[in-house]
Image (cartoon, helix red, strand yellow):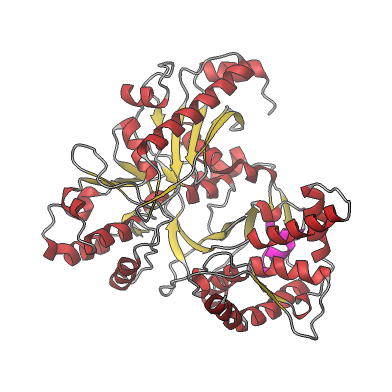
Amino acid sequence: MGFVASDIKNSIINGKTALGIEFGSTRIKAVLIGEDNSPIASGSHEWENSYINNIWTYSLEDIWTGLQDSYQKMKEDAKEKYGVTIETVGAIGFSAMMHGYMAFNKDGELLVPFRTWRNNITEASSKALTELFQFHIPQRWSIAHLYQAILNEEEHISDIDYLTTLAGYIHWKLTGQKVLGVGEASGVFPIDLATKDYNARMIQQFDDLVAPKNLPWNLGDILPKVLLAGEKAGELTEEGAKLLDPSGDLKAGILLCPPEGDAGTGMVATNSIAQRTGNVSAGTSVFAMIVLEKELSKVHPEIDLVTTPTGNLVAMAHSNNCSSDINAWVGLFNEFAKAMGLECDANQLFGTLFNKALEGDKDCGGLLSYGYLSGEHITGFEEGRPLFVRSSDSKFNLANFMRVNLYTALGALKIGLDILLKEEGVKLDKILGHGGLFKTKGVGQSIMAAAINAPVTVMETAGEGGAWGIALLASFMINKGENESLEDYLNNKIFAGKMGETMNPDPEDVEGFNEFMKRYIKGLAIERAAVENL
């Protein structure tokens, strides 16, 4: 729309903006959007989790310092660009890494340090609840953490008055409201698609399961209330305004949208919340999310089920390893180039090597590699060993070598997606790719299309990320038309005309990837031997 600085200044003064703040695992980012929903100011704060007493955690102090710093930097950015101090915004939304465990007593005190999604300490609980509910409960889900603490007979259990996530905690402290958006809530406890609320049968099963412990609470009483995208989720209190902006410039009374998880904000930022669409994020790890038309026929431990911010079912396949091993190999080639007296920048280096992969044999010439820097739950590995192996008659050249490293980056993910697309017959019209693997134009995109045998789109705006996604959800709440769905709002008001570049799968590439996958699955025994002996 091409808003000029004076228009944006007026939007800020008149509160025609929306603010989204997302807590990622290494960065807290604040994005202010204007009347055309484009970012107009932003600020970010780097932070790191700590490993204390065998628990991955962030301190409450780090949470608030980081929130205030990212907000302050966004405020300074707006002041610098438009000469105005932010005193109000149209609406605010908070988002964060999903799952994990934050338990509070009736005085609002945190009972044990925040346990993040990274903690794999709930195996017994995860297995027992999956069995009980006949619904896959991953280790990182809040309910798995709660039941594990009960199994461990931890002292704090009887004092729990409220259990929430990081996004839910921040929202509660700023508004006094104990609520979660349905997407975030779906990573706390399974959602009933008919009621768009926690599954009542499973809540009852859980209460019956823990009844012998004589706890002073029922599960339904300690969980946050579930809200859908577009619903109002409270107002910024006087106390909340001071917490967010200690300078006192920000006024109370601003509306907040339901707090959402990073999965949901990623879906919004990539316009992939409609049924039969999906998005795949490929970087250090890789995950794909596909919005389903109906429930799956059975429980699959490789597939997590969550929901969109509107309460539609989403299947998620994720793999711990994606680009780390490729990056290490590219680093080795960079060392070689330097030793030869050649200087090349990272983009040129990645671009040259990735494009070389397109010249390789469709099945990688018989080469095999595993980029397992860490364990891989889809293939059943607790730990990993990066590995490259070939037979004496395989075609070992640079093109095939780069191609096999790109194929294998999606190997474990493909096993998960094959369960959905082949076993369950899930329909996928298009998937949107974002993340580092797609940076070199056309390469990661064509290989992803071959892996899933579906068109892959890459959009320039996909890089805006989750903070923009939650800002859009805040904007939707105050700007939506009567009966306007989030899908329509995104299609007509946000992404209209932003089609991105779509690449259809090449049938020969698809066949070549399937050939490679036979080798990949058979060769897992080699990876197992490496883990056991190296």
**385 or 257, nearer to the observer:** 385
Q: Which of 423 and 285 is in front in this view?
A: 285
What is the quadrant of the N terminus in the image?
Answer: top right
The question of residue 448 being in magenta is answered with: yes
Q: Which residue lies furthest to the right in this view?
A: 341
Q: In this view, does 446 lie to the left or right of 155?
A: right
Q: Residue at x 85, y 68 (%)?
A: 359
Q: Residue 291: x percent and y percent?
A: 51, 59
* Residue under the image location 45 percent in, 44 percent down: 96
- The residue at the far top in this view is 83
Residue 117: x and y, percent?
41, 54
Question: What quarter of the picture does the C terminus occupy?
Answer: bottom right
Whether the magenta-drawn stretch holds residue 470 is answered as no
Does 327 appear above or below 294? above
Stretch in magenta? 443-457
Q: Which residue is drawn at 35% across and 31% down?
A: 174
Q: Which of 370 and 13 is in front in this view?
A: 370
Q: Can residue 480 be seen in this view?
A: no
Query: Does any portion of residue 384 appear in the rendered image?
Result: yes
* Percent position of residue 21, x then y: 48, 35
Q: Is residue 470 above or below residue 381?
A: above
Query: Tag count in the figure?
Result: 0
In the image, what residue occupies the spot 52% across and 74% down? 379
Please state the horizontal and vertical placement of residue 416, each as a whole percent of the image.
54, 70
Query: In the shown orientation, is residue 507 left or right of residue 90?
Result: right
362 lies above or below 489: below
Does the magenta stretch mainly form a helix, a strand or a loop?
A: helix
